[in-house]
Image (spheres, rainbow, N blue to C red):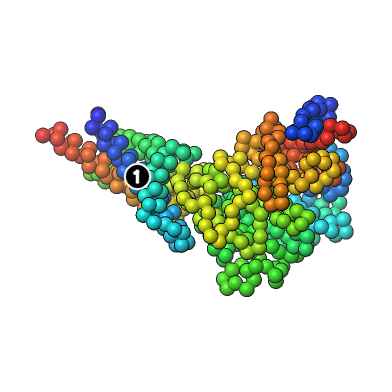
């Protein structure tokens, strides 16, 4: 149980970290295109700032949002795995993608199409973020597969 | 029930609350209740006032009594999010031509899932709007229902200023001149474009643009000397009061004193050559809404002050100006909650509109005046 919990928290951290850095770089790239004085120190301070600020200073803590989304998605996946015989890695990857899709694709529908996560304002951005959720889910699934393999030996 | 409502309304007159600003004694009275998200107000005579309800109705208030039937002939609006029937403004020659200007959000004619900010001109004939003419539509249309701006003001030369917000999702486009996101537009009273606008000869720029780099512009007043005061919502922090000059870039989102609602740093920069600074900004945000420049005689010591209504947590800000600088700020009426707008009545009293589905119109008048 502890191993599962740690794997889950790591997968949440992966998804959250990738989501936040994508938003940071979205802003950095645009600022650079506007000839604003973006240098390495600005990039590093924005990255560090966002990793903290998006979990503390925002209207909603991004990490908590991802945690809740993935918790629901992974619990549903765990139940599905009772009946469905698919490689855990792929099913959890789908679950991770679905969790992020709920955040960046469905949540705006409740807020008059406002994309509250700046990196998710484009189709490409949404796609990338869903992909990061899939990476996080794949990691979690892989850890579960390892666990199952060890148990069977 | 009607008797109770009548008594409730007029008990406001009896329940006068004497209060004091720094040096000014005043009282308040509730003159209208039960408005559905009142947004803008305009006096059409000493005793009659038009009030927009964001939900789509234009209401007439006569001698403090709300006409039960809305003004007819108001176009259908998109009432969603921050969208709906917004500003009502009278033509400078209203007494002769009876022209009324309305701003509102409405679905795009070709793609109804998208919407635009619209401005129409119509003639007020009795209690009906006739001879409608659309004089402005924001371009391109947007999918979001937020950040419309939608304030209007006539300049001394008869040109009309229109504020157009950044649409929330389209903030970067506030820095481009080929669209209406995050702009102040200057048009003639019939919607045509003045040929002395700053970007008329700029290739690729929309000729009606007067200034750019704005976010969600909610207050717009013009002083007698031609100074244009504008205020706009920042994101999380960074509400701004600006003095607008033609052709200038006000920086959003390249420079800002706020952060994104998600907590993300939109820009670490607060100033940049070629981008204008606000004359005042608020961190944290106070959710600026309307604005009035007090030039009447009822409160002599308030003459020349800016009054800004705010919705977070909800109050009225009195700003003393020294030319183009804010030298003092006083917070008033914090007990009223979210205040959506403030205007000056013909008699010099201040008129406040509270926000929400049960909005009120409140009159603020000098303690030595009759109600």
Going by the image, does B238 lie left or right of B357?
A: left
The x, y position of residue B111, in whole percent, is: 57, 59
Looking at the image, residue B224 lies above or below residue B201: above
Going by the image, does A102 lie left or right of A78?
A: right
Looking at the figure, which quarter contains the C terminus of chain B? top right
Looking at the image, residue B43 lies above or below residue B276: above
| Residue A104 can be seen, yes or no | yes
The x, y position of residue A114, in whole percent, is: 52, 48
**Pick the front one: B362 or B228:** B228
The x, y position of residue B361, in whole percent, is: 76, 37
| Residue B107 can be seen, yes or no | no
Helix or strand or loop: what does disc 1 sit on? helix
Q: Quadrant of residue B139?
A: bottom right
Residue at 25%, 29% in the rendered image = A2
Q: Which residue is mark 1?
A: A17
Packing grade of label 1 (10 A; few <14, some 14-19, many >=20) is some
Residue located farthest toward the left when viewing the structure as drawn: A153
Looking at the figure, which quarter contains the N terminus of chain B? top right
Looking at the image, residue A122 lies above or below residue B41: below
Going by the image, does B207 lie left or right of B93?
A: left
Residue at 66%, 63% in the rendered image = B246
Going by the image, does A111 lie left or right of B73?
A: left
Residue at 43%, 42% in the rendered image = A54
Q: Quadrant of residue B297?
A: top right
């Amino acid at each position: 149980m502890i191993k599962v919990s740690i794997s889950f928290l790591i997968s949440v951290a992966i998804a959250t970290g990738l989501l936040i850095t994508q938003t940071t770089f979205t802003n950095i790239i645009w600022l650079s295109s506007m000839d604003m004085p973006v240098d390495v120190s600005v990039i590093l301070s924005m990255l560090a700032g966002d990793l903290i600020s998006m979990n503390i200073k925002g209207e909603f803590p991004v990490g908590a949002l991802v945690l809740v989304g993935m918790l629901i998605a992974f619990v549903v996946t765990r139940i599905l795995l009772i009946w469905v015989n698919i490689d855990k890695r792929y099913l959890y990857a789908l679950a991770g993608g679905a969790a992020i899709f709920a955040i960046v694709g469905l949540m705006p529908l409740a807020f008059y199409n406002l994309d509250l996560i700046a990196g998710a304002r484009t189709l490409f951005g949404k796609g990338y973020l869903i992909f990061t959720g899939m990476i996080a889910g794949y990691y979690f699934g892989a850890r579960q597969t390892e666990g199952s393999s060890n148990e069977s030996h | 029930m009607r008797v109770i409502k009548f008594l409730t309304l007029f008990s406001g007159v009896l329940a006068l609350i004497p209060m004091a600003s720094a040096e000014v004694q005043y009282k308040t009275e509730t003159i209208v209740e039960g408005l559905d998200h009142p947004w803008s107000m305009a006096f059409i005579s000493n005793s009659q006032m038009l009030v927009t309800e964001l939900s789509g109705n234009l209401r007439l208030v006569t001698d403090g009594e709300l006409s039960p039937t809305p003004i007819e002939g108001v176009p259908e609006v998109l009432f969603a999010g921050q969208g709906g029937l917004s500003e009502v403004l009278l033509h400078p020659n209203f007494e002769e031509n009876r022209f009324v200007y309305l701003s509102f959000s409405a679905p795009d004619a070709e793609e109804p899932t998208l919407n635009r900010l619209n401005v129409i001109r119509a003639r007020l004939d009795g209690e009906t709007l006739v001879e409608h003419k659309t004089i402005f539509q924001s371009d391109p249309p947007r999918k979001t229902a937020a950040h419309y701006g939608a304030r209007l003001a006539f300049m001394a030369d008869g040109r009309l200023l229109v504020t157009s917000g950044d649409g929330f999702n389209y903030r970067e486009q506030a820095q481009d001149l080929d669209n209406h996101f995050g702009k102040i537009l200057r048009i003639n009273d019939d919607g045509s474009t003045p040929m002395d606008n700053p970007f008329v000869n700029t290739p690729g720029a929309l000729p009606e643009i007067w200034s750019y780099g704005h976010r969600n512009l909610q207050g717009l007043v013009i002083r007698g000397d031609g100074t244009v005061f504008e205020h706009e919502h920042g994101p999380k922090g960074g509400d701004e009061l600006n003095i607008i000059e033609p052709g200038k870039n006000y920086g959003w989102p390249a420079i800002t004193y706020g952060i994104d609602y998600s907590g993300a740093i939109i820009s670490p920069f607060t100033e940049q050559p070629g981008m204008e600074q606000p004359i005042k900004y608020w961190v944290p945000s106070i959710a600026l809404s309307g604005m009035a420049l007090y030039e009447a005689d009822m409160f002599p010591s308030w003459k020349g002050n800016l009054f800004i209504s705010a919705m977070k947590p909800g109050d009225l800000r009195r700003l003393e100006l020294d030319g183009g600088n804010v030298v003092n700020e006083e917070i008033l009426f914090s007990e009223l909650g979210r205040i959506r707008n403030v205007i000056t009545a013909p008699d010099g009293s201040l008129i406040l509109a509270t926000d929400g589905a049960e909005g009120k119109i409140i009159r603020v008048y000098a303690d030595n005046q009759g109600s």
